[in-house]
Amino acid sequence: MRQKQYRVVLSYIVKQDSAIYALRVISSDCIAPAGPECYKIHMAISSIDELSQYIELSNSERKWNPEGESTLPILISDHLIPMLNNPAIRKQFVPDAAENEDRECTLDPQMEREHQGTSRLIHRYRNRAAFITTDRCFSYCRHCFRRRIAGSELGAADDKAITEAAAYVASHPEIKEILLTGGDMFTLSDERINQLLSAFREKCPSVILRLCTRAAAVYPERFTDNLMEIIRKNLRKGAPFYLMTQFNHPDELTDDAIEAVARFVDIGIPAMNQSVLLKGVNDDAAILEKLSEKLLLARIKPYYLFQGDPVRGTGHLRTTVSEGLKIEKELRKRVSGLGMPQYTIDLPQGGGKVILTHSYLVCIDEKRDKYVFETPDGETRTYPD
Ligand code: SF4
């Protein structure tokens, strides 16, 4: 693991009733509001002034207003700092004034607030539910679709919220999977993670737990021996765990990131990757091909490639659907079925997820009882009905 070499300063921002307050604390050994429920995070950049000490900011980046309505705080982990001159990393983590100027969409296009089973449990799909473990992340992604939650004042789930959610799931046998999400569940302390996993294991042992995290990409050192022992211990008590990662660009798969994911796979937890199609980051079939190759070598299945949700403040990072479909068609030519993620759109107003793909069916010749297809290479083939 890398040696720490940065200053130790805490500066974080919380949103409260739409107003934003900036707090600044100097700490000797951590830079997060650590308590019994939170993991201590080391050095991170948490203001534009700090950021300007590491990279030369463009006018647009400098003009970003942290108090703007549709933005979220800046937080960039020390793992990412050496990578900030990489345009793909920079676009994902360095804020831009375009966030403040985007006023077209809502902050909750999926209308998650209308599907709350308990205070922190979103039950939008019949057979699965999402538990909001915390608002905190190791770094805030500028494309975050949960920016109404990430970096807010919500805080970590307490005993009551965990117990309430586990009881709700136990009384809804139609729920087969729980997504432990946020924020990033691994910003919780080891003790709170143990409590969380144990509660769901005890009340609903046959429900699959999806451990959703960006930490492998942005703070891989989080997966310590102690944490992995807690996960392993709870894993043995019921249905499988799945690790749900988010890598959007092949350069995020550093040696440390790959090693972090391997710790899960080695104890029998499959790893699946959910990418977001992002303008200027990965909106190119060659980049996605490389990403798929690296994911498979790291034993991570490319699972989803999401069309960006129409969340206010993220418009400058979204591609058009027609562009996404072109990329999907080209990618399908380049990678195997194993390496192909599903290009997916999460329809607004809780419409659900639908798969987007180029249609290879050209027409149905009903008189001659045959289907006419376009091959991936652009030729024509017929198939008898
Ligand atoms: S880690 Fe996830 S929840 Fe946190 S900012 Fe990134 S996308 Fe949003």
Image (spheres, rainbow, N blue to C red):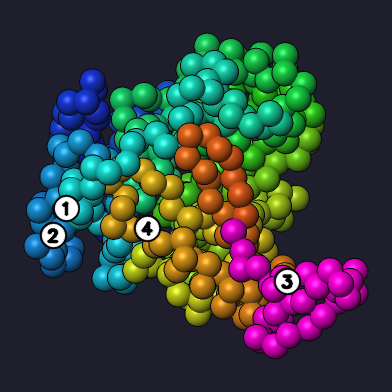
First of labels 1, 3 by sequence position:
1
Q: Which mark is residue 108?
A: none
Secondary structure beneath disc 1? loop
**Which residue position is annotated with label 2?**
60
**Which residue position is annotated with label 1?**
97
Which residue corresponds to the image point at 64% horizontal and 40% vertical from the top-left?
210
Q: Which mark is residue 363?
A: 3
Displayed quadrant of residue 343? bottom right
Which residue corresponds to the image point at 66% horizontal and 86% vertical from the top-left?
377
- What's under tag 3, amino acid-wise? Cys
- What's under tag 2, amino acid-wise? Ser
- Mark 1 or 3: the one toward you: 3
First of labels 3, 2 by sequence position:
2
- What's under tag 1, amino acid-wise? Ala
Which region is colored magenta? 356-385
- Mark 4 or 3: the one toward you: 3
Classed neighbour count for the residue bearing mark 1: other residues with Cα under 10 Å, few (<14), some (14–19), many (≥20): some
Depth check, front residue: 189 or 92: 92
Secondary structure beneath disc 3? strand
Cα separation, mark 2 vs mark 4, equals 17 Å
First of labels 4, 3 by sequence position:
4
Cα separation, mark 4 vs mark 1, equals 15 Å
Classed neighbour count for the residue bearing mark 3: other residues with Cα under 10 Å, few (<14), some (14–19), many (≥20): few
x, y (%) of residue 64?
14, 50
